[in-house]
Image (cartoon, rainbow, N blue to C red):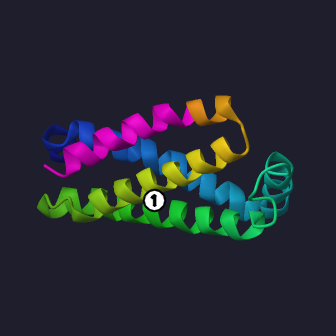
Amino acid sequence: MELLKNYPTEILILLFLIVTFLQSGMDKVLDWNGNLSFIKGHFSNSPLKNMVPLLLAVILIVEVLASLFMIFGIYQLATNGIKTYALLGTELAALTLILLLIGQRLAKDYAGAMTLAVYFATTIFGVYLLSK
């Protein structure tokens, strides 16, 4: 309970982002073909249409890495109060969201791009808190 007492906002943001990115990564792993099919259709009229499998793999890797860094970051915060891995994880999460935003804008999915703003604002607040 000391962890939540000392870093309540940071931990809650990290948990939110871990759930978001780990679930997204696991969904891609468990249903690669379904995700690939959906994304190919989504980007069929964009400049990215021929690169979808590679880009989906890149997003998957960065999502999982961000999640792992944030999980280890919570452990690091709990054991010695150091924020290094938690910060790295949130920075990777922010990078992932920027990559997703680029994709949504190129696919002309403006509503999808707008939805990312909520995640990005939360992530940037986490980066801010963890970089102090």
Q: Which percent across, then down, holds residue 23?
A: 59, 51
Span highlighted in magenta in the image = 115-132
> Residue furthest toward the front?
47
Residue 107 to residue 29: above or below: above
Would residue 70 be found to the left or right of residue 28 on screen? Answer: left
Query: Can you say which quadrant of the picture contains the N terminus?
Result: top left
Q: Which percent across, then down, holds residue 26?
A: 64, 59
Kindly identify which residue carries mark 1.
67
Q: Which percent across, then down, holds residue 37?
A: 86, 55
Q: Secondary structure at mark 1?
A: helix
Would residue 68 be found to the left or right of residue 114 on screen? Answer: left
Q: Which percent across, then down, holds residue 45?
A: 84, 48
Q: Residue at 44% x, 46% y: name it.
A: 17
**Magenta run includes residue 53:** no
Q: What's under tag 1, amino acid-wise? A: Ser
Would residue 8 be found to the left or right of residue 46 on screen? Answer: left
Q: Main secondary structure of the magenta part?
A: helix
Q: Residue at 28% x, 57% y: name it.
A: 87
Query: Is 129 or 53 nearer to us in this picture?
Result: 53
Q: Residue at 29% x, 38% y: name it.
A: 125
Can you tell which quarter of the image residue 81 is in?
A: bottom left
Query: Is 108 or 130 nearer to us in this picture?
Result: 108
Query: Is 38 or 3 nearer to us in this picture?
Result: 38
